[in-house]
Amino acid sequence: MAEALKKRRYIWTLVGVSFLSVIAGLIIAANLNWTNPISARSDVPIIGGVPSFAELAQQVSPAVVNISTVKRVKGGGRVFDYFMGPRERKNPMDEFFERFFGDTPQREYKQKSLGSGFMLDGEGYILTNNHVVEDADEIKVILKDHQELEAKVIGRDAKTDLALIKIKSWKGLHLIKLGNSDELRVGDWVVAIGNPFGLENTITAGIVSAKGRVIGAGPYDNFIQTDASINPGNSGGPLINLKGEVVGINTAIFAGGQGIGFAIPINTAKELIAQLKEKGKVTRGWLGVMIQKVTPELAKAFDLKDESGALVGDVTSGSPAEKAGIKPGDIIIEFEGKAIKEMSELPRLVAAVPLGKVVEVKVLRNGGAQVFKVQIQEMEEKQTASGPSQMKEGLGLSLNEFTPELARRYGVDFEPGLLVMQVKDGSPADDAGIQTGDLIKEVNRKPVKDIRTFQGIVTNSKKGGAILFRLKRGGTSLFASLRLGE
């Protein structure tokens, strides 16, 4: 009897141990999956709980190139050196002139710069940033095996800061697969590859901090923000996902913060590569409206439920929008069936429309929705993208010509002048006390009725001097003095 009881205890002990082992195994497996989600979704090896990018780097690095450019400029001596940086002396007598005469005679010098790029195909096409090769007289591409090949510019697009260059077809060129930046998620791992500070094939890793960033670089801003280090020389290099695919082109550094960089989504580049190859430039659609952000104050004034959409501040005479019947004060909420949540979305959608295509534009007017059919035309160089009239003089003002239609919208009497649509925080205009909604009547005692007149007066003003504004605010006239930068 005692022996039978002993056997039963032994059996239950084995069952208990087995059960606990199974439970422990499940807990460990669950814990591993929780602490290491990357291993479940990717082939990137995990070392000590941290992803290793060694194999990824080995796979894609040979397709990343160093781009060296030379720009010939004329200048003289130490003043030239101070503003333009180190130069390559062409004559040993320069040192003699500088020592005994204080400066060298003006002559031609070479200004050098570095950037990055990556191979697109076996024909030798390379994608990079426009600012890397813009105005360059010589372009050299340096491969990972240190071969130096001459390159030429095939096409450039300053508005998106993209450029396509080409080297002669070369055996053994390595390529990177282009991914889908729309599938990229905030929090995903990414790897930046390039040549920061001329240090070839440097690799940094981080995560996607945000998408759709507008940083004021151009009318089609739509940047990927990442904390993967992007430094001078990285420009034009690829931003890679864990599959080894290009999801962005490293472009900008945020000067006001450390560890913040921006990349152009690869899907933006995909839309333009064919045009750059065929025409050397990008042809875009044009709507012909000046738009602004719907602020909480404007949303309240227009009796809107939220701040979605793009407020039409002005319509260009003879434009597709004017012909279709769109007017200042309309709020564009849909374009070709796509909802407009942010003002910055509209220019990108318009630019991508094939020329001559008729699209439907849905607007809010007087509290009701209306749909207009607009035939998109080609944007010429002198025309600007759909956006508010930004002033380039660094005043921090966004202006629109005040029209009878705008006067009716705001419920005020019409009088000629320029309506202040926006004032940048901390700008000279902000410091002078100019406010959104002010009507500029005079600049330096001269009446202003249009943007061109305003720009002419400001341009002719002396640097460091003061500009006198006469404003109208709420039925009261007042003056404001604004000082131009040195």
Image: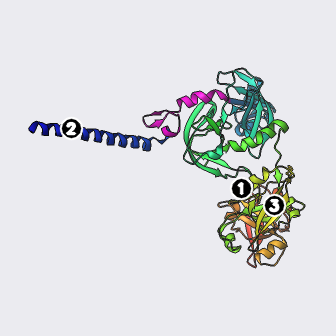
Coloured how?
Answer: rainbow
Q: Residue at x 81, y 60 (%)?
A: 289
The label shown at residue 11 is: 2
Q: From mark 1 to mark 3, how far is it between C-alphas?
A: 14 Å
Considering the image in quadrants, where does the N terminus appear?
A: top left
Q: Is 324 located above or below residue 109 in the figure? A: below
In this figure, which residue is indicated by the disc labeled 1? 345
Q: Which residues are magenta?
A: 39-65
Q: Residue at x 69, y 65 (%)?
A: 294
Reply yes or no: does residue 197 show up in magenta: no
| Secondary structure at numbered mark 1 | helix
In this figure, which residue is indicated by the disc labeled 3? 289
- Does residue 309 show up? yes
Q: Residue at x 61, y 40 (%)?
A: 230
- Eye-nearest disc, 1 or 3: 1
x and y percent of residue 442 in the render?
82, 69
Q: Quadrant of residue 396?
A: bottom right
- Does residue 200 show up? no
Considering only order in the chain, which callout, 2 or 1, is on the residue closer to the N terminus?
2
Q: From mark 1 to mark 2, how far is it between C-alphas?
A: 70 Å
Q: From mark 2 to mark 3, how far is it between C-alphas?
A: 83 Å
x and y percent of residue 376 in the render?
85, 55
